[in-house]
Image: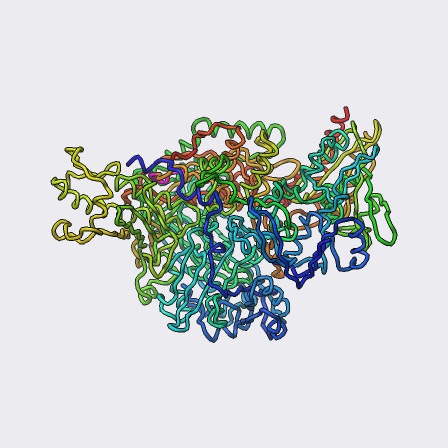
Amino acid sequence: MKPRPFDYVRPDTADEAVALLAEHGDEARVLAGGQSLMAMMNLRLADPGMLIDISRIEGLEGIRDLGEKIEVGAAVTQNKLLAWPDLSKKLPLLAAALPFVGHFQTRNKGTVCGSVAHADPSSEISLSLATLQGEVVLRSKQRGERVLAAKDFQLDMLTTAREADELIVAVRFPVHAGRGVAFREVARRQGDFAMVAVAAFIEDKGHLRLGIGGMAGTPVVQRMAIGGMTDAIETIASGLEGYEDLHASAELRRDILRNLAPLVIAEAQKCAA
Amino acid sequence: MSKRLGTSVARKEDPALLSGHGRYADDLPVPAGTLHAHVIRSPHPHADIVSIDAAEALAKDGVWAVITGDDVRKISDPFLVALKAPIHQWSLAVERVRFVGEPVALVVAENRYLAEDAAELVQIEYTPLEAIIDPVAACKPSAPILHAEANTNEVSVRKFQYGDTKSAFEKADKVVKLTVDFHRLSFTPMECFVAVASYNPANDSYDCMANFQGPFSTHPVMARALRVPGPKMRLRIPPDSGGSFGIKLSVFPYVVLAALASKITGRPVKWVEDRAEHLLAASSGPNRVTEIEAAVTKDGKILGLRMDQLEDYGAFLRAPMPGPLYRMHGAVTGGYDVANIDVINRVVLTNKMPASLIRGFGGPQLYLALERLVQRIAIELGLDHLDVIRRNLVPPEKFPYHAAAGSLYDSGDYPRAVETAIGGGRLDHLKKRRDEARKAGRKYGIGFAVVVEPAMSNMGYLSTLLTPEARDKAGPKNGATSMVTVNLDPLGAVSVTADVTVQGQGHETVLAQIVAEQLGLTPHDIDVTLEMDTAKDQWSIAAGTYSCRFTPGTAVAAHMAAGQIAAKLKGIAAKQLNVLPDDVELVGGKIRSRSNPDNAVSFSRIAGTSHWSPVMLPDGMAPVISETGVWNPPELAPPSGDDRINTSFTYGFVFDMCGIEIDPVTYQVKVDRYVSMHDAGKILNPMIADGQICGAFAQGIAAALYEEFVTNEEGAFLTGTFADYLVPTVSEIPPVELLHMESPSPFTPLGAKGLAEGNCMSVPACIANAIADALGVKDVQLPATPRRIHALMAQHGGVR
Amino acid sequence: MRRVNKDQKVRISLTLNGRKMSAETEPRMLLSDFLRHSLGATGTHVGCEHGVCGCCTVQIDGTAVRSCLTLAMQAEDRAVTTVESLAGPGGTLNKLQQAFRNHHALQCGFCTPGILMSFTDFLARNPKPTEEELRDVLGGHICRCTGYAGIMAALKEAAGLTNTNEPTGAKS
């Protein structure tokens, strides 16, 4: 279990990084925390010709309060965001979701943006970003910066709209201070990828957003009227194909969703009240 | 019993292990120029090897060799197996592969990274063959045959009859039947396999180092494969090993492979298994399908049992397989007084990784079947499960108890153990919890399990596999010899070596306790060195750490060796103190007159005498520099002509009771409360004993709820990483309440029995019984994952 | 910008347990291998090489990380701390190590260094954790020997959640 050979480059600036991607984008992979990538490389399931290590780029290490949004740079680790003093006030859904991401030790190195970039269907961070209708900020040497809505970014399992020459420089989470939110997931073991993850976000007195992870190639976010939730959940549950894997049948996933969603919604409502 | 023994002496092992100073196999220095190996493994469950083209790999800088089955066949022999059947296994596949992960070629290069690169350049062409995965299907005439010369996949069938089972079934009020399937799993030690070997052409010998665990009966298997006499295959085992649980027996084919690679390359060769290899191909516990039935009276007394056990060993039988099927054989009636039993033992081969040693070794399979059956008896007769248990337990007045199939249970009071465990309000509490949960519409169940826990295997148990006639021809096999040596140095310091391999059981500490006890010293005064060297240390074929042999075996040998030293030192001291040897005692670092304690000399002074002044020893006494205790209990007789076999030396008792609830949201089985009662005779170090029990308990939970090697029907292996093969973390292991009682074994001077495997055996059965109780179902397949529980509930109409 | 090509070997420096050290590496060498085989710090163990088991946990600049998911290059010019740093002069066990010994929190000891390094980081940042938090952090490690009971008892003692003399504790 040793990786294949690759060129290692550690740029000092984001400009250097996007320049490298412009030249080597097809064969290069960006290394931020490496908590998924390195495991795949050790198993020789990933085979980049070049690794571009962005973990020391100072400009990417920040958590910036933009007022209505919080921008999290590409080198910000999950534990750094979890320890951000304003997190539970301004991004309570992230405060609820981040503890479910891997383990303390992997959150120490794994980055927020890396999780979004990896686009695992069970990713808690991708699910939170989608539920909050956040954004992904991409930069390339040729075309400069573009901003994609979360729903336009993750296209399918492990597939995103990022072009080969683009660097994810940040993700932006809408500030949702005081909103009712809740997050729960069901995994085989504590810290495992979720079989089903559910995020609830109360929009207003009449509506909420329900985000579901682990059931499809991308997070599924549905707006629903408070009051008609039982039917809405049933419609989602029976409508989702639901993954079939070693640990869960599609029917098990659907039933967990049916059981879990009302609890998460109730928790969000309680937290809103 | 003394103050040293029976107390929780802190472990001597810990300071080094806590400070990064452990010396595990991959930590030890290797000779300059050592090459590193990587194994190329079969991607097919069953295929003919058409060709292997290594030219491109060999052209790469730093690559020394690509070794194939053709190479090893020329210079080595197939591994010996207990069963006389034409099943030939070399250290690399020869002509055909029979499981996904089977070693096909070995790349030897300057480092591991390069070896893995080169492996990708080796072109291997296969012709895939139909694979057979299911053990029952593998016995059908239409099944593809793994070993053509054997002509069948069902390579051994033996039928045993004890008592008059036919009459018992004729007399029965009712017959209760059940089919139970025990799955494949491993206990995946955190340290994987390591093997290093150097060939010396000057005298055609091999110097090997590996984290092998024993039994040392496998040493001749390795030496024979290498075509050398035993002393020319020196095997050294490092002072520390990162866990084993039976699994590290299975490093032995790789020791041979590394040895052959050294012979071929002329350099020392080192191989370190990685986790992907370990999960794919290291070793699995055997899966077993048991058809079991009981003839019972209407009040629940078991008159007779019939068991048909079909055990699946995967692609090859490796020594000492099929051990799990026979290790429990004498005790096949478990904790119950059943005089009539018929057993059919069948061994089948399939296209899966070979099965081998694993903690519990046949116990989990046996007890899942037996204990599920006892619960079914209660349900089908409308009786209380516990009452059926009570009605059938071996009564205390029958000890030492001759079990129907030949085990001689040394001591115990099973009814008292059960009553103690359920007492103290524990069972009442569980019932209250169950009533409350059920009232609220939740699924809650209570389970019990009764386990007789064997320790120290009779070296003759496996010959029960052979017919009495074949046994006579093969020569007698029986007993189990344990050996410990206690040494005195010139300044009177005491050191100990023993016939065990270290895996974390705290043997260093307990041996120091035992020896200190006899010599009037403290455990701190005793240095214990447990790294093993087959060329220089004492060992028999029984040596190694497995089947809980330490406490009833090695510990006794230590007691004897230290006793021999003590007796001789008393003789020496008596002369110097001018008293009779009977009046001498060893206390507090002194050797003194019992009647006049002021008449004393230091222990070290007397202990050094044989070095400095052997001429002054008492008349006729040989110098006392080292003494080896050799212990072979006479109870471990060979199988009798009617196939009765005392498979183990001591028999402890475990009674488990638990309450579980099905999580209504996740379908996860949640253990609400778990109580485990143990009687392992005298406890030598309670802290270490509880540590062993807690570890076995966690592995029992793992087997019951999480861990499973999954191979699909086509033979693809689906649990190849720790993300798919789910080893429980702390959050998945519930607390366990431990209770102890002590019925000392009358057969050993220490009265102590083994205790480290019982919960591997009891927990799966106990949890399965609780699940059956919660859901009102008959068949419970383990591990009881949410997926399986959900499907069971769907089948029985109550998913939500 | 630091650049090392795949076939290139370079010498890198880092601080290991307070001492500056350097050795040759290639880009793909894992930090776990570099520490063990290039720098001789074999106290850090390798259990799975895919980031699940936690045996290889070390600290980089005080933060506990999986060294098998880290390249040696990534530790260049950083301070790496391993289990060898924990004991005091003469091998005196520190509070956390001693708690492990008191509660029989290790058997084979292979997973132990990683666990100690995780909690050395965690307890430094969270000196007054709850039992739940301890359990959560321990969840990043697999131990096959102990069933975790002794480890939790040791962690509770080290975090000041229990007295030093639990009934199951060792007597020296």
Give the quadrant of residue B463.
bottom left
- Residue B495 can be seen in this image: yes
Outermost front residue: C20
In percent of width and height, residue B405 lies at: 35, 51
Kindly report the secondary structure that dominates the magenta region of the rendered protein: loop
- Residue B731 can be seen in this image: no
Quarter of the image containing the N terminus of chain B? top left
In percent of width and height, residue B207 lies at: 41, 64
Outermost right residue: A143
In percent of width and height, residue A13 lies at: 77, 48
Q: Nearer the viewer, residue C37 or B88?
A: C37
Residue occupying image coordinates x 74% and y 26%: A270
Residue C109, compared with residue C135, is above or below; it is below
Q: Indicate how the structure is coloured in the image.
A: rainbow
Total labels drawn = 0
In percent of width and height, residue B311 lies at: 48, 57
Quick check: is A167 in the magenta stretch?
Answer: no
Q: Nearer the viewer, residue B305 or A179?
A: A179
Q: Nearer the viewer, residue B85 or C118?
A: C118
| Residue bounds of the magenta highlight | B678-682
